[in-house]
Image (cartoon, rainbow, N blue to C red):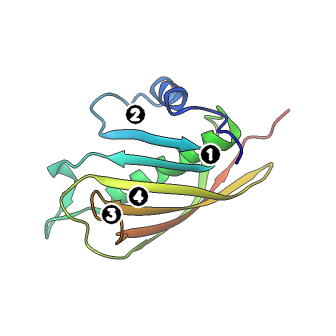
Amino acid sequence: MRASLMSAEEIGVLLEKEFPQAFYPGSGLSIERVNFGDIRVRKAFHEDHLRPGGTISGPTMMELADFAMYVAVFSAVGPQPLAVTTNLNINFLRKPSQADLIAHAKLMKVGKRLAVGEVWLYTDGQEDEPVAHVTSTYSLPVQK
């Protein structure tokens, strides 16, 4: 297995510097595990994430999935803050509980210009029943 090009701590520092509006103490986002193209992140539960009916909103789940893919991309290509999402497709599978959400992202292909991966979202403590499945593609900046 290849080693991650950035550690969880290095990715956290980069995100705090480049995206302070999204990744900051109190954002609820945390990086739990980073391997090469295979990561686990968390979104802490907050009542603001609920939609009518008491379920966690779709935008909250999409935010976590996109964050997970971004961390996975950094683990495989290094510090490339100009990498951008070009596609994100989400299938909502079941109603998440009112608890932290866990995302496990795995890159399926990393090329010179694109990275393709999938993300499984789970309610914390119920990782045998995913609440959503995501496929996503990131465009990578051209290396000179």
Is label 1 in a helix, a strand or a loop? helix
Q: Who is closer to the viewer here, 79 or 125?
A: 125
Find out whether the residues at labels 4 and 3 contact each other: C-beta distance under 8 Å: yes
Find out whether the residues at labels 4 and 1 contact each other: C-beta distance under 8 Å: no
Tag shown at residue 23: 2
Find out whether the residues at labels 3 and 1 contact each other: C-beta distance under 8 Å: no
Residue at (71, 45) in percent of width and height: 140
Which residue has dot 4 on it? 62
Residue at (34, 72) in percent of width and height: 129
Report the side of 82 relative to 121 (left or right). right
Find out whether the residues at labels 2 and 1 contact each other: C-beta distance under 8 Å: no
Q: Which is more foreground, mark 3 or mark 1?
A: 1
**Within 10 angstroms of label 4, few (less than 14), some, or many (20 or more) residues?**
some
Residue at (19, 47) in percent of width and height: 46
Q: Which is more foreground, mark 2 or mark 1?
A: 1
Tag shown at residue 115: none
Which residue has dot 1 on it? 73
Q: Looking at this view, name the residue that lies furthest to the bottom.
A: 93
Which residue has dot 3 on it? 58
Residue at (68, 39) in percent of width and height: 3
Rendering quarter of residue 23: top left
Report the side of 43 relative to 98 (left or right). right
Q: Which is more foreground, mark 4 or mark 1?
A: 1
Is label 4 in a helix, a strand or a loop? helix
**Residue type indicated by callout 4:** Met
Q: CA distance from mark 3 to mark 1?
A: 22 Å
Position in image of residue 9 (x %, y %): 49, 27
Position in image of residue 95 (x %, y %): 25, 72
**Within 10 angstroms of label 2, few (less than 14), some, or many (20 or more) residues?**
some
Q: CA distance from mark 4 to mark 2?
A: 15 Å
**Residue type indicated by callout 3:** Gly
Sequence-wise, which precedes: disc 2 or disc 1? Answer: 2
